[in-house]
Amino acid sequence: MAASLLHLLVTTTAVACIAKAVKECPPWFEWVNTSDSSGYCDCPSELPNFIHCDERNQRSSISQGSCIFYNRKEDTISATSCLFFFPAHATKNGMFTLPANVSELNSVVCGNLSREVKGPMCGRCTNGTGPSVYSIGTECVPCSPINIFYYFLLQYLPSMVMFLIVIIFRPNITSGPMANYVLFCNFSVIYFRLNLWIFVKPHDAITNVAKAALTLSAVWSFDALLFVSPHLCISHHMEEFYIPFLEFVATLYPFVLLLLTYAVIEMHRKNFAPVVYLWRLFSRVYVQFYRAWDPKIINDSSLCITVLFVICQAQLSYLAGI
């Protein structure tokens, strides 16, 4: 298990490379002088599963899930693995062919991303579109004001349902076969989320059967919506780096609910007037809820926190990795 986890961390870590740009040569090639005062373009080195050079055709290509940009000010080429987006067109082996001219590099790469060149990266979606909060590569999609409502409904309603299941039924998934199953589901989601689309496009690689299997696994990590939800753009002003923040807030949401529930019951026990009055409005529901759960919340609060942490560990691990 430790070796597999180490491999996962190594293969999902962003790799950054910088090379000197040569206008007479394709990206990543360098000019080599010869004894007869002429010269030729040569690829000094390749990076496996990252950058490939075709010496015969004098073209270079970069793997799906990687980004490469030309810095005109410093006259350098930077390449790195992209956790947020990837070129839309690639060959069957998952490689994206780069243009022959260095000056066209940014427009070609960003154009395939439906993005505009902003700074050293393709930093912003074009034509009033914005990054999708539910997509493997944060694709640029049309935005609508009502999408905010859909986002909160799809993101927080399942978390609320899972929270109620945890605190009412108190399932013990921290030991035994169930713990192993949940752990496997979490690592499966992390692996597919960070590795699958580095080489191939998601809709080409994941069939409906695979999507169903991933969704069943992702239920235990609050990540099921990533594979089944429609693409939603909240705002065309939103940058990609806000999406991990939204996921972080959604991951902490069940823990906040647990803390608030604990606080409300404690205030009711101490006869805090507003809480007592509000609970009287729902007396029948509260009586059933109190008999089933309230006397055990103090003793079982640590178990609830542990269960929620186990369920949320996929998102927590993913957010820690980016």
Image (cartoon, rainbow, N blue to C red):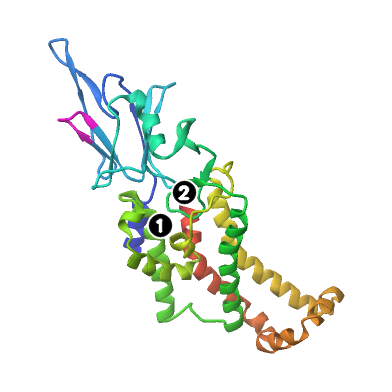
Check residue 138 in the rendering and tell me which mark sits there, or answer none.
2
Seen from the viewer's position, the closer of residues 169 and 89 is 89
Q: Callout 1: 10 Å neighbours few (<14), some, many (20+)? A: many
Tell me if residue 43 comes above or below residue 49 in the rendering.
Answer: above
Residue 1 visible in rendering? no
Closest to the observer: 14 or 131? 131
Q: Position of residue 96 (x, y in %)?
A: 29, 40
Could you tell me residue 34's position as x and y percent?
15, 15
56 drawn magenta: yes
Q: Residue at x 35, y 65 (%)?
A: 208
Residue at image coords 79%, 79%: 279
* x and y, in percent, of residue 31 in the image: 23, 20
Disc number for residue 193: 1
| 38 horizontally vs 281: left or right | left
In this view, the residue farthest toward the top is 37
Q: Distance between the Cα atoms at labels 2 and 1?
A: 12 Å
Q: Is residue 248 above or below residue 216?
A: above
The foreground one among 88 and 13 is: 88
Residue 221 pos. (x, y %): 48, 67
Q: Residue at x 85, y 73 (%)?
A: 274
Magenta residues span 53-59
Depth check, mark 2 against mark 1: the one in front is: 2
